[in-house]
Amino acid sequence: DTGVSQDPRHKITKRGQNVTFRCDPISEHNRLYWYRQTLGQGPEFLTYFQNEAQLEKSRLLSDRFSAERPKGSFSTLEIQRTEQGDSAMYLCASSSEGDREKLFFGSGTQLSVL
Amino acid sequence: AQSVAQPEDQVNVAEGNPLTVKCTYSVSGNPYLFWYVQYPNRGLQFLLKYITGDNLVKGSYGFEAEFNKSQTSFHLKKPSALVSDSALYFCAVRDMSGGYQKVTFGTGTKLQVIP
């Protein structure tokens, strides 16, 4: 069990650029979640995958955001035409079918949009 | 809609004293309730959960939480605080009735244990 890995740890970009983040969940976990956290707030749900199927999307997830989990293993979150308001910590979590309520979080990707 | 409230931004407690971190929730149906802890520069870690059954739930690192349906509360407790317990604590809820996997987190309570 190597835990949930996220890459990169930090990303600085200019407004209008596209960015992509990667999440590698715990290998036997079929459920994967993306959350966003800003300073002084709790994590906000963005989207949920069960295997390769994206089953839930938050209304927070504008059409500039897209997430994939093509083979039911790693996932990517892409933000197109970044805005300063996108600056946040992007968290990935995973859970197993046997204990679906226990989420294991990665350390996150800190995005700064200048 | 589901929500949680953590009324205290910060809780200070002396080492060795009991601690309580408060949480209240709101859901349409029955709740799944959780506590997570976040240490500096580290990811969120699961502490405990309430799904059903006994109202007193025991979790990691000696923490426990009490589910009170009439007061819609799920306070986190520990009999004797350690300096190493100092961290940011998040309460979270998922509404069982909606069939959704979305978990809603509170804004967090910073716990400071004073030596």
Image: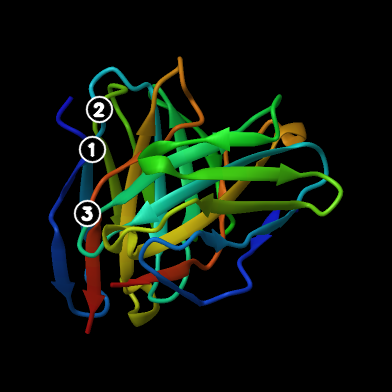
Residue B12 in which image quadrant: bottom left
Q: Which residue is mark 3?
A: A20
Which residue appears farthest toward the front when viewing the image? B16
Q: What secondary structure is found at the residue carrying circle 3?
A: strand
Is B67 located above or below residue A55 in the figure? below
Marker disc for residue A4: 1
Marker disc for residue A26: 2
Both on one chain, marks 2 and 1?
A: yes
Q: Nearer the viewer, residue A22 or A9?
A: A9
Both on one chain, marks 1 and 3?
A: yes
Q: Is residue B115 visible?
A: yes
Residue at (52, 77) in percent of width and height: B9
Q: Earlier in the sequence, mark 2 or mark 1?
A: 1
Residue type at mark 2: give it: Ile
Is A64 located above or below residue B46 in the figure? below
Residue type at mark 3: give it: Thr
Q: Marks 3/2: CA distance?
A: 20 Å
Q: Are marks 1 and 3 in contact (CB under 8 Å)?
A: no
The reply, left or right, for residue A104 in relation to residue B63 is left
Residue at (24, 65) in percent of width and height: B40
